[in-house]
Image (spheres, rainbow, N blue to C red):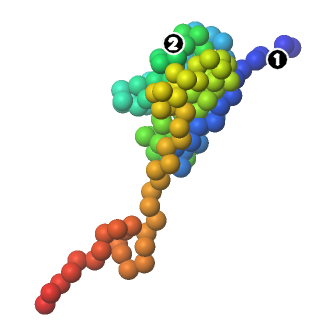
């Protein structure tokens, strides 16, 4: 059997981690074994996932197979986008400036802030009572 070539990229956002494989193909995006339209019915998340492919004009050049776990819907879609952008650079190094310009290669460092002692949440204090 002939070994199929693919380009790999790992994307992260919040607590979500996405492992992306780009295979030469017609443009199908499969996430955890299901098409991305079923897994992410919201159009904003779909747009986030496809943004690196649209910006680099590679929408119909590669099939994308993704394994994603952790986090919620928003974090997962951001992680997938980050992973696709990284995999595209491995496929074609000339796409790096375009992806960098659109902010698709920068890992979003924002995560949930931890709860502090004496507070109800990270910053919410208990209600003050004067009397």
Residue at 59% x, 32% y is: 83
- 105 lies left or right of 116: right
Residue at 21% x, 81% y is: 128
Asked which secondary structure carries label 2, the reply is loop
Residue 10 x %, y %: 63, 36
**Cα gap from disc 1 to disc 2, whole angstroms:** 27 Å
Mark on residue 22?
none
Looking at the rendering, which quadrant does residue 91 occupy?
top right
Q: State which quarter of the image contains the N terminus.
A: top right
Q: How many marks?
A: 2
Nearest to the observer: residue 109 or residue 83:
109
Nearest to the observer: residue 113 or residue 36:
113
Residue 79 x %, y %: 53, 38
Check whether the beta carbons of the residues at disc 1 and disc 2 lie within 8 A of each other.
no
- 97 lies left or right of 6: left
Mark on residue 3?
1
* Disc number lying in front (1 or 2): 2
Asked which secondary structure carries label 1, the reply is loop
Residue at 36% x, 30% y is: 44
Mark nearer the N terminus (1 vs 2): 1
Residue 123 x %, y %: 34, 68
Residue at 52% x, 25% y is: 99
Could you classify mark 2 by the number of other residues whose Cα lies within 10 Å: few (under 14), some (14-19), or many (20 or more)? few
- 91 lies left or right of 110: right
Q: Which residue is identified by label 2? A: 57
Looking at the rendering, which quadrant does residue 125 occupy?
bottom left
Residue 104 x %, y %: 50, 31
């Amino acid at each position: 059997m002939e070994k199929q070539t693919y380009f790999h990229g790992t994307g992260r956002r919040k607590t979500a981690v996405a492992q992306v494989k780009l295979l030469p193909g017609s443009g199908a995006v499969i996430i955890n074994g299901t098409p991305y339209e079923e897994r992410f019915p919201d159009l904003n998340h779909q747009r986030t996932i496809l943004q690196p492919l649209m910006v680099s004009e590679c929408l119909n050049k590669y099939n994308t197979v993704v394994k994603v776990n952790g986090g919620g819907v928003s974090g997962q879609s951001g992680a997938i986008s980050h992973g696709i952008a990284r995999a595209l650079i491995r496929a074609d190094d000339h796409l790096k400036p375009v992806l960098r310009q659109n902010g698709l290669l920068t890992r979003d460092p924002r995560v949930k802030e931890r709860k502090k002692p004496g507070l109800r949440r990270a910053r919410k204090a208990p209600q003050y009572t004067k009397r």
